[in-house]
Amino acid sequence: MTDYADHNEGVIDVDRKKTTVAQRIARIVFIVVGVAGIFVSISFAALMSDMISGMLLLMISVGCLGFAMVNFQKVGCPHCGQEVTIHKLNHDFECKHCHKPTAINWK
Ligand SMILES: [Zn+2]
């Protein structure tokens, strides 16, 4: 994916990829599992005084929630042409390869 049309210094236009139905369902499942896991882990720690299991479960749950929020897309760096993976909420990034900052113009 190297879809940048703008050749201005450090600004690229990027088409925001649409999420598929499967991705949305997966995200909802991860959120539900994550939230349920947090409640279960708290009750583990509070009711059974099992802090280790509670903490472990809490970490897994937070991981699930984090995974649900992940929304990455690959764009081409306008300076060096390398593919860079960015989060869709970002409005700029620094290329890992040439370390130049680039602004993203989401379409
Ligand atoms: Zn670059």
Image (cartoon, grey):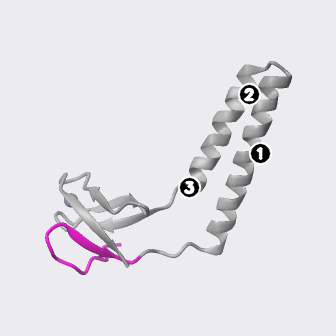
Q: Quadrant of the C terminus?
A: bottom left
**Magenta-span inclusion, residue 2:** yes
List the single residue furthest toward the left.
9
**Magenta-span inclusion, residue 39:** no
Residue 53 in the image: state x and y as whole percent.
74, 25
List the single residue furthest toward the right.
47
**Relative to 94, 56 lies left or right:** right
**SS type, badge 2:** helix
Give the magenta range.
1-15
Earlier in the chain: of badge 2 and badge 3, it is: 2
Residue under the image location 29 percent in, 57 percent down: 93
Q: Quadrant of the N terminus?
A: bottom left
**SS type, badge 3:** helix
Q: Main secondary structure of the magenta part?
A: loop
**Relative to 34, 105 lies left or right:** left
* Quarter of the view holding residue 86: bottom left
Give the amino acid at mark 2.
Gly
Q: Which residue is mark 2?
A: 54
Vertical placement of residue 52 versus 23, above or below: above
Structural distance between the alpha carbons of marks 1 and 2: 13 Å
Give the amino acid at mark 1.
Ala
Q: Is 18 or 107 nearer to us in this picture?
A: 107
Residue 78 in the image: state x and y as whole percent.
20, 68
**Relative to 33, 14 lies left or right:** left
Quadrant of picture, ligand 1: bottom left
Vertical placement of residue 21 versus 53, above or below: below
Dots 2, 3 in contact, CB < 8 A:
no
